[in-house]
Amino acid sequence: MNLTSLFSVDHILDDMQATEHFNALEELVDHLAGGNFLEGLPKQSVMEAIRNRENQTSTGIGSGVAIPHAFVPGLRSITTVFGRSHKGIDFEAIDHVPVNLVVLFIVPEDQYHTHLETLAAIAKMLNDGETRARLIDAPDAEAILSIIQESFSA
């Protein structure tokens, strides 16, 4: 699956400030809301869907990576935001390592197949140690976008 169309510089938060799990999720959703990427949905309903998913089990998958995701009623198309934290986020990851790279995506509730394809593609990209290092070291959002595009088109 080619996900390059889901990312733009506006979908990248390259210097996250939150250091705790749910605060980081809120920071990412605020970024989506500020860019009008929530299709008019209330931020609270999006956060509720994400919190419900995270309360099942943390999406901190290890190696400094988290891929939070949720089905959101009323959403018409998949929406993503990439976040990078230089400080590290306590994301309750399975390996207990602070998270530096977060890709949050929300999906319309009837797009289960799209959800699985998106999760697999993002996990594949972030599973590569060299890609993770490049994303962490990238100077700005434009460079991050370039790395993401390169990874998805490979």
Image: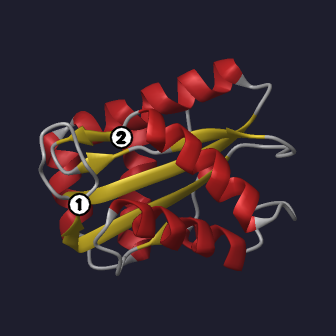
Q: Residue at x 36, y 40 (%)?
A: 58
Q: Can you tell which quarter of the image residue 2 is in?
A: top right
Comparing 149 with 141, the one in front is 141
Q: Quadrant of residue 121?
A: top left
Which of the numbered marks, if any, corresponds to residue 116?
none
Q: Is residue 4 visible?
A: no
Residue at x 37%, y 40% (from the top left corner) = 59
Residue 36: x and y in percent read 77, 72
> In the displayed structure, does residue 122 sit left or right of residue 40?
left
Q: Position of residue 151 (x, y in %)?
A: 37, 42
Q: Nearer the viewer, residue 68 or 92?
A: 92
**Residue 58 shows which numbered tag?**
2
Residue at disc 2, secondary structure: loop
In the image: residue 30, left or right of residue 82 = right
Q: Position of residue 30 (x, y in %)?
A: 61, 74
Q: CA distance from mark 2 to mark 1?
A: 11 Å
Q: Left or right of 46: which side holds 91?
A: left
Residue labelled with disc 1 = 90
In this picture, is 115 found above or below 50?
above
Q: Amino acid at mark 1?
A: Asp
Vertical side of 111 occupied by 83: above or below:
below
Q: Quadrant of the C terminus?
A: top left
Q: Nearer the viewer, residue 17 or 149?
A: 17
Local crowd size for mark 2, using a 10 Å CA cut-off: few (<14), some (14–19), many (≥20): some
Q: Quadrant of residue 111?
A: top right
Q: Residue at x 58, y 64 (%)?
A: 8
Q: Position of residue 114 (x, y in %)?
A: 66, 26
- Residue 97 visible in rendering: yes
| Image quarter (top left, top right, bottom left or bottom right) of the N terminus | top right
